């Protein structure tokens, strides 16, 4: 049997670990052959493949990014997209497809599997940890580690200059990275997209922190919004998801803090640093287990399913369960960390 593998959407530390586990177990235990598709859905759409065998996956476990490349190509938005994918899979004798992706990529896999009978198995990935049906996605732990290290470093420079340091982390729709890294790094304010923030309140927390002779660290998710602030932070252009681009909440907030408190403030935008480089041990562990279970789904002919983490078990759920709604930060969890603010 020949199995296709693709990685779609934004890259994420741990993608190579999944690919390696799928290929190692598939070849060694089940005698499968593999075809790697290049750049997400673009690969099967255009029949663009890459060799995927044991030598190809040697040494990739600790490597960030994806050896298959990635893109945000959506075949449902292409003329005859589904037909072209089906024709290319048939031409290449690919009988099953393992799709490693986030909301958009898995959304396509759901429709291909459920409506068009394409035998897909899903593997959830995103540094944002905002996919439902799985307790964690790989990549998240690495991103939180990078953001926490940055916050630790920013504490010492903030204190040397008695400045406010605003750290903008990723998370357009969910504040998981902000919440976890902010808590781990001892931030004085954490702002998430799920809760509109009050600039006056943020400034009051900043001021109280200075009064206690500490320089405050403010962690803000890129998708966090001030109350009544939509117009300030929205840009006219669209990003690669086709969403309205958000422009610099961190920079905007630092300016507001300076204006309203009279204290010097600086912004650090961590950006794609959070997605790059070697995955943490936890992400390698999770990604590897996802890969091992995904190839078992293929062996069992259990298509339309996605592997997911529940507690410490890997389970199978319908792919659609991951994408039906985003997993956002529970207000109770946010309230819990509020005790450290100010
Ligand atoms: O992978 C998700 C994510 O990291 C979001 O947090 C962020 O908004 C987005 O990717 C940025 O993606 P890109 O700049 O690669 O389009």
Image: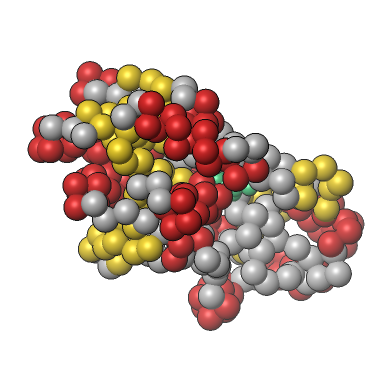
Residue 253 at what x, y percent from top left? 79, 55
- Picture quadrant of residue 328: bottom right
- Asked if 65 appears above or below 75 in the picture, the reply is above
Residue 80 at what x, y percent from top left? 60, 38
- Asked if 187 appears above or below 67 in the picture, the reply is below
Residue 218 at what x, y percent from top left? 66, 58
Determine the residue positioned at 28% across, 67% down. 311
Instruction: Work out which quarter of the rendered image holds the N terminus and state it.
Output: top left
Residue 238 at what x, y percent from top left? 77, 44
Determine the residue positioned at 64% across, 64% down. 192
Q: Can residue 92 be seen in this view?
A: yes
Ligand 1 - quadrant of the structure image: top right
Q: Nearer the viewer, residue 47 or 228?
A: 47
Determine the residue positioned at 40% across, 66% down. 133
Q: Can residue 217 be seen in this view?
A: no
Instruction: Work out which quarter of the rendered image holds the C terminus and state it.
Output: bottom right
């Amino acid at each position: 049997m020949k199995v296709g593998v693709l990685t779609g959407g934004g890259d994420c530390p741990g993608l190579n670990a999944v690919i390696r586990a799928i290929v190692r177990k598939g070849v060694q235990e089940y005698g499968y052959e593999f075809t790697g598709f290049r750049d997400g859905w673009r690969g099967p759409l255009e029949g663009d493949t890459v060799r995927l065998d044991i030598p190809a996956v040697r040494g990739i476990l600790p490597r960030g990014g994806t050896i298959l490349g990635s893109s945000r190509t959506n075949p449902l938005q292409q003329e005859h997209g589904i037909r072209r994918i089906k024709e290319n899979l048939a031409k290449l004798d690919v009988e099953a497809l393992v799709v490693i992706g986030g909301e958009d990529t898995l959304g396509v896999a759901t429709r291909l599997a459920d409506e068009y009978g394409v035998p897909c198995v899903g593997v959830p990935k995103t540094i944002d940890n905002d996919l439902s049906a799985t307790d964690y996605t790989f990549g998240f732990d690495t991103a939180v580690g990078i953001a926490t290290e940055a916050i630790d470093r920013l504490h010492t420079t903030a204190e040397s200059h008695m400045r406010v340091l605003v750290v903008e982390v990723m998370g357009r729709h969910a504040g998981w990275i902000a919440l976890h890294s902010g808590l781990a790094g001892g931030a004085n304010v954490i702002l998430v997209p799920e809760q509109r923030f009050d600039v006056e309140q943020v400034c009051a927390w900043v001021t109280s922190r200075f009064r206690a002779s500490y320089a405050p660290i403010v962690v803000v998710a890129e998708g966090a919004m001030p109350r009544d602030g939509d117009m300030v932070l929205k840009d006219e252009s669209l990003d690669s998801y086709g969403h309205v681009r958000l422009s610099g909440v961190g920079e905007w907030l630092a300016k507001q803090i300076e204006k309203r408190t009279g204290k010097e403030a600086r912004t650090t935008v961590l950006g794609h640093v959070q997605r790059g480089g070697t995955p943490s041990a936890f992400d390698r562990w999770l990604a590897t287990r996802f890969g091992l279970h995904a190839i078992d789904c293929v062996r069992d002919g259990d298509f339309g399913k996605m592997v997911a983490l529940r507690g410490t078990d890997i389970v199978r759920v319908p792919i659609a369960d991951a994408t039906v709604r985003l997993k956002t930060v529970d207000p109770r969890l946010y309230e819990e960390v509020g005790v450290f603010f100010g």
